[in-house]
Amino acid sequence: MKSFLPTRRSCDQTWTGSYLRSVQGVLLAILASVSAITPGSLAVAEEDPVKHSTDVRLLFREDWKTTPAELPITQDHVATEDLVLAMHGPGQQGIKKSHHDKPIDDPFYLWSGQCEKRWAFSLRPKYRIDLSAPDARLRLRTKQSGDRQLYVLIKLADEQWCISKQSIPASQDWREFELKFADLDWSGFDPVKINRGEDESPVSLKAIEEIGLTDLQAGGGSKASSRIDWIAVWGNQAVASKSAVVISERSEVDSATTAGCRLEKFTLHSAVMGRDVRVVVVLPPEYDGHPDKRYPVLYALHGRGAPYTSWASMAPLLHRLKDKPMIVTCFDGGYGSCYLDAPNGGMVDKSVVVRQPRGKPDHMTEEQYQEMVREWEAAPAKLKSLYTTFFLKEFVPALDHFYRVDSENRAVTGFSLGGFGALHYAFEEPRMFRSISGLSSAFFDEESILASMQRRRSSLRAVLGDYETDKENYYAANQFARLDKFTKSGGTLPPIYQHCGLKDGLLGANHKMRDALKSAGCDVTYLESEGSHNWTFWKGASKGVIDFHWEHFQTTD
């Protein structure tokens, strides 16, 4: 990999540090810059920088708060308002916000020395940014000891991550560097394992969601680590227009009326998964009579192996929509996808997505069972399971396009494994939802994940791999650990409603999650009543789900 080295024009830089304050240090730096010029490379920044064009502006500069050192670094240490910090990789808990009383000018900085494994961090502004202009650039003050070299990370609008091929070299003292994004070449990047992927060419810089750094190594204490004092980015706010969002195509709509509500069924093409996904939308009785009105929307997730139409067939829920009008919509989340994005590009065995026939269930007609057999036989051996990306990037925009959705009033719910999915989506985009809920929700901690590995047909193993060998894939599955990390980094979940039956096998897990949420300071409404983990309970409990979300749809920020 090519390292960025000082160029001739950096020779008048006043560098900090003892050896650069001496004449000998300055002469050595000049000699290094003259002997190692790399065209288009990163320059040690000048006190009076070369003139840049005016087609970009300073988007943000993060200096970290001047607070005592703490491990790990969290959102509380971010000084810039509306800038969200995210840590990545198996070594992320070792990323420290560091500072020393001596020397007196020691900065407040991010330090990787205590990371036991590979690490990365990224910063997300409140809007997407455009780094395609020739003078779009990154400037930072950094110091890397040992053989550590920093690489730039970007997250594209399509959820793809990239890492620069060029690097910021190791240095013995603090130095300021500047680079232009147009000069960088890119490879794919795995933010979970912190691995470089295949070369990416070309890469569009017009809509970037996050910018970060990594040295692709574990920390090695003071002698082998990376330090970042501050980081600044120049560019433009990405143009936000409907033309920038590609709306998924949908099939012809099959419409019917039940309990005064209009039910519309269709398939929505998912580009990220390369196939059509079945969808049902429930429109409240008054929808057609108020063509100028927009309605709150409740995204409803089904459980493992349950029909995607489950929520749309709950009569108590449908009757509730007459007085509490909202759109309720459900999509086919596969047989046991857990609503997660599977690693390694999302490829999984088809049994994750399509229900495998194992004899006709009592509740199913012979015609329905034969349809299941045909669907199983027609499916390829491997399918993509990327239900997080599908929901956030395809399903939500498509429903906004086809229906009169009030984008300020969204909520998500689910029963059983769908309850797990609802909380997962809230962790992914907490500001998207006014409220979240779950009936008999499945929640996993390390103990229950290990127990799941002992089952012959484990949904988690089918999606994420074996826990012992692929543990880094399970960051989203252990929602107790995720909640702890989320709240420590300054995250806030919307109000939550839980309802579980007294004879439900998941009652203990719901008690544990209730307590964890309350300890984290979350707004939790918890209810338990007679019932088991079955359709009878969920159907009756659906009324409470509508009532809870309707109440929060009426609130204003």
Image: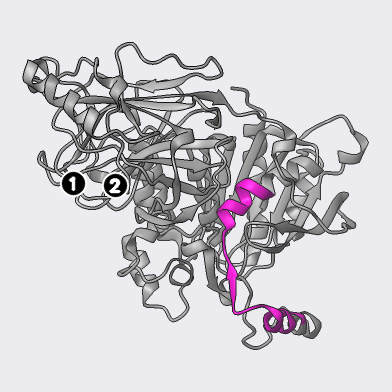
How many residues crowd mark 2 within 10 Å: few (<14), some (14–19), many (20+)?
many
**Amino acid at dot 1:** Gly
Q: Are marks 1 and 2 in contact (CB under 8 Å)?
A: yes
> Which span is picked out in magenta?
371-394
Residue 513 included in the magenta stretch of the image: no
Between 507 and 382, the one nearer to me in the picture: 382
Extreme residue toward the top, this view: 48
Which quarter of the picture shows residue 254?
Answer: bottom right
Q: Residue at x 37, y 71 (%)?
A: 466
Q: Earlier in the sequence, mark 1 or mark 2?
A: 2
Image position of 86 with respect to 556: above or below = below
- Say which amino acid is labelled 2: Trp
Residue 327 % position (x, y) = 76, 44
Is 383 one of the magenta-colored residues? yes
Q: Taking 551 as reference, is 136 left or right?
A: left
Tally of numbered tags: 2
At a point 35% along the width and 21% down the height, the residue shown is 79
* Residue 344 falls left or right of residue 95: right
Tell me the residue that label 2 is attached to: 119
Residue furthest front as drawn? 35
Label for residue 219?
Answer: 1
Answer with left or right where residue 264 lies relative to residue 487: right
Give coordinates of residue 94: x percent, y percent: 22, 44
Instruction: Say which element carries label 1.
Output: loop
